[in-house]
Amino acid sequence: MTTTTRQDCLALDRDDPLAPLRDAFALPAGVIYLDGNSLGALPKATAQRIQQVMQDEWGRDLIRSWNSAGWIDLAQRIGNKIAPLVGAGANELTVGDSTSVNLYKVLSAAVELVRADAAKVNARQRRLIVSERSNFPTDLYIADTIARAQGFELKMVEADALADHMNDDLAVLMLTHVNYRTGRMHDMATVTRAAHAAGALMVWDLAHSAGAVPVNLKGDGSDAAGADFAVGCGYKYLNGGPGAPAFVWAHPRHVARMDREQMRQPLSGWLGHAAPFEFSTDYRPADGIQRFVCGTPPVLSMAALECGIDVFADAEPFGGMAALRRKSLALTALFIDLVESRCAGHGLALVTPRDDALRGSQASFARAEGAYAIMQALIARGVIGDFRAPDLLRFGFTPLYTRFVDAWDAAEHLAAVLASGEWREARFNQRAAVT
Ligand SMILES: *Cc1c(COP(=O)(O)O)cnc(C)c1O
């Protein structure tokens, strides 16, 4: 039972060194936004930047802007701004396409590397791509498609059973760092080490961690994951806007090997070519991560994504990702406490780990009846989270702009929705296309 009061939360906000960052966002009045893990909020700088790109770069300068405004270098420039947030080196990460498409590229490349390894020593082919049954479905669909096309098999297992599959049948382990439903977080370094010890490659999806949780894909130090490939999402915690381009990273040793052994990623489009404006009929991959680019970048979306990423540079003087992580954990712990004490007896069951080391930046509660309608009733009150079938109320906490008092008020509204039973009203029980 927490004794935290609303006054306490206001005091936490007063003392929060990251509090000024909220000013970077255009948040509507009267809304408590707890869905930045699904669509990040709009940075104030974005609208003006898009206007400028439209009017000056596109409208006035027209096609010259590919050179004069640096459109052709956007993917690399933004990639280099995301890289430090996930522990990747300069020019190792690029931006474009969706998370699903980037996963297709890197998982295909990983499978090909494993196949080539076996062929070299005439070894029996490893057969399994292993992932978590509760991984985000698009990741599983993409993996299944690759497995079928390449003569592998997708094996879906429970998170607790991963250790049982670290053997010589494992080709690639593909996991999402933070689970989209439960918010449970894997220890990247430990899992990657186990996959490598089994002789397999490791692909990480950072959709629910990049921008909320410090990630060290490659770097130095004890938390360095030493991962092989990674992808991540631009429109969640990176605040890039609806449908923002995603990112893709490959360890330089794999890129170098793909180069040596003339391997390709499967979507070998012209902007991943070493010299696209030679218009050669032969595909010759560009150096480095650039070979994972396919076609023309969506410049307006890229411009919006860059504004979202730039907020993280503003956060550096306040302690950067480490400070954001501390605040994120404090917010989710507070919210869990408040909900459990104020909504006790209403059938909510926490599915998010209480252990800081295992928790991403969200809090999810299961409720056997009415979870969808309860979320709709909350949204009508201005508290925006989301519903994940069949029974989850999901609340994402974005430390860049969420306040401690927001956690308090959201828990209070949830308690009121449950106590009043207002969620039973017909208007809250009509399922929309997007939940
Ligand atoms: C959000 C999310 C995606 C999104 O994929 P898109 O191709 O952008 O639609 C993929 N994987 C995971 C784990 C996600 O959380």
Image (cartoon, grey):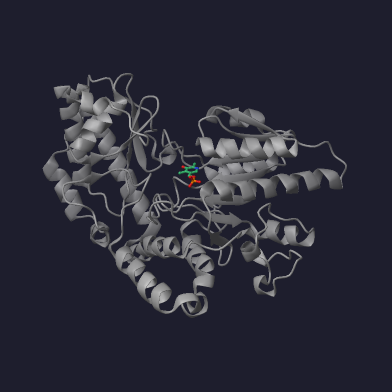
Residue 102 locus on image (x, y percent): 57, 51
Q: Horizontally, is 424 left or right of 271 in the view?
A: left
Q: Please say if 141 is above or below 399.
A: above
Q: Nearer the viewer, residue 400 or 291?
A: 291
**Count of numbered badges drawn on the protein:** 0
Q: Please say if 390 is above or below 234.
A: above
Q: Quadrant of the N terminus?
A: top left
Q: Please say if 195 is above or below 66.
A: above
Q: Nearer the viewer, residue 366 or 361?
A: 366
Residue 267 locus on image (x, y percent): 65, 54
Quarter of the image holding residue 407?
A: top left
Which residue is pictured at 55% across the width and 27% down the height? 158
In the rendered image, is residue 361 in sight?
yes
Which residue is pictured at 43% across the width and 40% down the height? 357
Q: Please say if 287 is above or below 170.
A: below
Q: Horizontally, is 307 left or right of 164 in the view?
A: left
Q: Quadrant of the C terminus?
A: top left
Which residue is pictured at 39% across the width and 33% down the height? 353
Q: Horizontally, is 77 left or right of 26 in the view?
A: right
Residue 115 locus on image (x, y percent): 78, 44
Outermost residue toward the left in this view: 7
Which residue is pictured at 64% across the width and 46% down the height? 107
